[in-house]
Structure formats: structure tokens, C-alpha cells
Amino acid sequence: MGLVTCSKCKKIYDYDKYSGICPKCARYNSNSTSAQEHQDYHDKYDNGYSHTAQEHHHSYHQKYDDNKNPHTYTSTAEEVENAKRNGDKRFKLIISAIIIILQIISYFHFFE
């Protein structure tokens, strides 16, 4: 693996020469992350099974939700923005129509 830095005392040493054990403070420094170690166990015992966060998320829906496939369709950011714009246009149109109707009513009452 080459040179590594001890996570405790920060000494730089040859990982292979000392088998991952720091010669200064005797701390074992793993050459892989916990995710890599986890996958290594899958490779060794489960014929390379791999899982992702998305699979975990989906399994929780399967276990706890009534809706067994909750993410069949999700809106894109563009669709959400278009819906907001269309909603604003509709709101302005309704307000304009109400104002016009009130003006017409007040106009007829003025001439009575």
C-alpha cells in the first residue's frame, strides 16, 4: 500500500512494512474505509452482493408503508416552476375578473 499517516500521532510510515501498526504509538490504521470493508465481507461471503442507500430507502417503504411503490413519479424542478407560474397567472386572472365585475356592478348602481 505504501506510505500512510497514523490517525492518532500523525507519523508517516510504510503500511506494508509494519502491517498497518504505527511504529510510534502502536495504533492499527486500516487501509480501507468501513464501506470498503463492508463490501469486502459481501464479496467474501455473499458472492458479491451490493446494496445502496436507495435500496435501503425502498425496503423501508416495503416494510412500513401502505403504498408499496411510492416513488413511481416525481415532478422535476422545471415542472414545479411551471406549475407555480401557471398558478400565479390563474390567480391574477381571477382577481382581474373580480375587479372588472365589481366595476361593472358599481357602474350600473351609479346610473340608477
Image: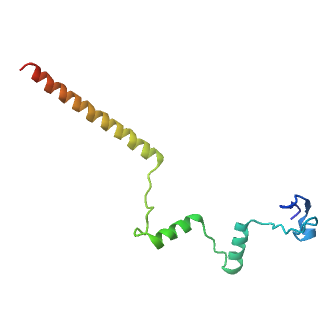
Where's the N terminus, which quadrant? bottom right
- Marks counted in the figure total 0
Q: Residue at x 88, y 60 (%)?
A: 9
In percent of the image, x 50 and y 69: which residue is there? Answer: 60
Front residue of 73/87: it is 87
> Could you tell whether 104 is left or right of 4 in the image?
left
Q: How is the image coloured?
A: rainbow
Residue 70's place in the image compared with 94, above or below, is below
Give the x, y percent position of residue 79: 43, 46
Please state if 87 lies on the left or on the right of 61 as rendered: left
Q: Nearer the viewer, residue 112 or 5?
A: 112
Could you say where residue 80 lies in the image, as x and y percent from the top left?
Answer: 43, 46
Q: Residue at x 43, y 58 (%)?
A: 73
Q: In this rendering, is residue 17 above or below 95?
A: below
Q: Residue at x 39, y 38 (%)?
A: 85
Q: Is residue 72 left or right of residue 40?
A: left
Q: Quadrant of residue 81?
A: top left
| Location of residue 82 (image quadrant) | top left
Looking at the image, the residue that sits furthest to the top is 111
Quarter of the image with the C terminus is top left
Left or right, 1 with reference to 84: right
Picture quarter containing residue 19?
Answer: bottom right
In x, y percent, where is residue 47?
66, 78
The image shows residue 14 at horizontal and vertical percentages of: 92, 64
